[in-house]
Amino acid sequence: MTDPVRVRFAPSPTGRLHIGGARTALFNWAFARANDGAFILRVEDTDSERNSEDSLHSILASMRWLGLDWDEGPEAGGAAGPYFQSERRDSYQAGIERGLAEGWLYRCFATSDEIQALRDAHREQKAHGCWASPSRDLDPATAERRAADGESCVLRFRVPLGEEILVRDHIRGEVRFRSDEVEDWVAVRSNGMPTYNFCCALDDDAMRISHVIRGEEHLVNTPKQILLAQAMSLRVPDFAHVPLILGEDGKKLSKRTGDTALGDYIDKGYPPEAMFNFLALLGFSIDDKTTVFNREELLAHFDLKRISKGGALFDTAKLHFLCAEYIRHTEPAELAQRLQPWLDQAGLQPPSMDSEQAGSDSASTSRKPWLETLANAFRERLGLYSELPDKAAFLFSDHVEIDDKAQKALDAEGAQDLLLRLAEALEQEPLFPPADWSAWIKNQAAIMEVGMGKLMKPMRAALSGTLGGPELADILVLLGRDRVLQRLRGASVRS
Ligand code: GLU
């Protein structure tokens, strides 16, 4: 029987969740969900100087926003906890003592300047293999005495010479490292706190992690973690190193070419489903043609074999296409809920709908149909949620900003007169808007003996201040009878 799938996302809470981290989390989540496995969130907070509570909260919030729920970890608990490395020190201590006793850890007294000088000299000589710490061959009893006397030291892992380390990677195939090229890495800092590589290998074993799915930048750490696992007879997990994310300049994604924190996209009003779909496409594909897919479709097709080795391009145009696509396909009631905070933030208060339209008498519930009509009217016209307040401002204010093209339409010969006649006709209708709007307006054009465009253009201009925007029928509903008549009549005095 094969071991159950258990994967982990292991962020360090030293900043907001990076796009690359979000993509790694998503792939781990998808692999767990597609294989009836467990998705574990482990917080790698060994660097006490750089950790912060705020970072942790924003990472958790970003994961929730993407809908990446975890089965074990902070707030979820679980049998393999604690899930904060800072709370697992006891378990590391046993490993440290064992390493010293067995000799695969040794005390190194060289200062960081001395180590740097060794590295530089080694590089200058273009020597084979790796630089060696002067403490590597110290007699352990002497080293122990020096440490007991208070001399500062770190603990290094004694990398064996002349071995080959094989990484079996689900994306890259077999990757081989020569142990001679791997330095004696620091396993425990001088303050006694073990380092990432040490804690990571021990925790992956203790938490029975079956697959380590992480960014390609960690491939250099993998031989170190495998050597430690071998020294301690731990189980070596399977690996999958996902490709780097490249900016549009072909270089590693960085602040230079765009936002790198997921939170920036949340703050700017990107739809979560679009971001989810987009992140999944950073290295993964269902086939060679499908761009738009939801969570279920991803899970139905998710396979580590379908993740590419080559860099994944952060294609901004594709992201924007996806945003518009998801907004367009969101149900109006749901979209209204998503858009409401953006209106609130801009201080735009939805008016209540006329009771004849809303069929409701309480002010708060009658805003709901208005908001849904608004959402439906703008569904095809938004790239981001945050664009709504600007685009819909004419519905909220008494003053309509008229742009140049609209002004031209209002200044056209006869336009003002047509608008007054239109107001007249509308006022006489028992229903507002008239039941069959397109038939009604056609009929008006016929009565007034003008083409439809001649009538609709100034009407649009008077009501919204632009010639673009939502359907006229929606604008009528959203403005309500009084404001429509006011604007049609006001257009003649405005200019
Ligand atoms: N704490 C590491 C990071 O944030 C995790 C690397 C790993 O997944 O092993 O990059």
Image: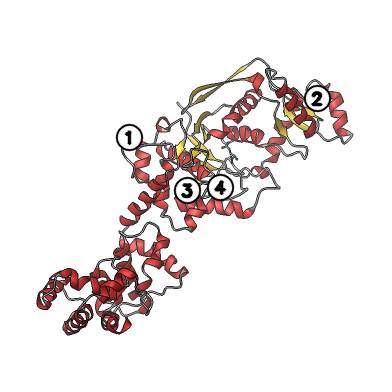
Q: Which disc is residue 288 wearing? A: 1
Residue 77 circle label: 4
Q: CA distance from mark 3 to mark 4?
A: 13 Å
User: Mark 2: which secondary structure?
Assistant: loop
Q: N-terminal of the two: label 1 or label 4? A: 4
Q: CA distance from mark 1 to mark 3?
A: 29 Å
Amino acid beneath label 3: Asp
Q: Is mark 1 within 8 Å of ligand 1?
A: no
Q: Amino acid at mark 1?
A: Asp
The residue tagged 2 is: 135
Reply above or below: 377 against 448. Answer: above
Q: Where does residue 482 sit, x and y in percent of width and height?
A: 28, 83
- Which residue position holds label 3? 69
Mark 2 and mark 4 residues within 8 Å of each other at the beta carbon: no
Q: Residue furthest right?
A: 149
- Left or right of 223 on screen, residue 142: right
Q: Nearer the viewer, mark 1 or mark 3?
A: 1
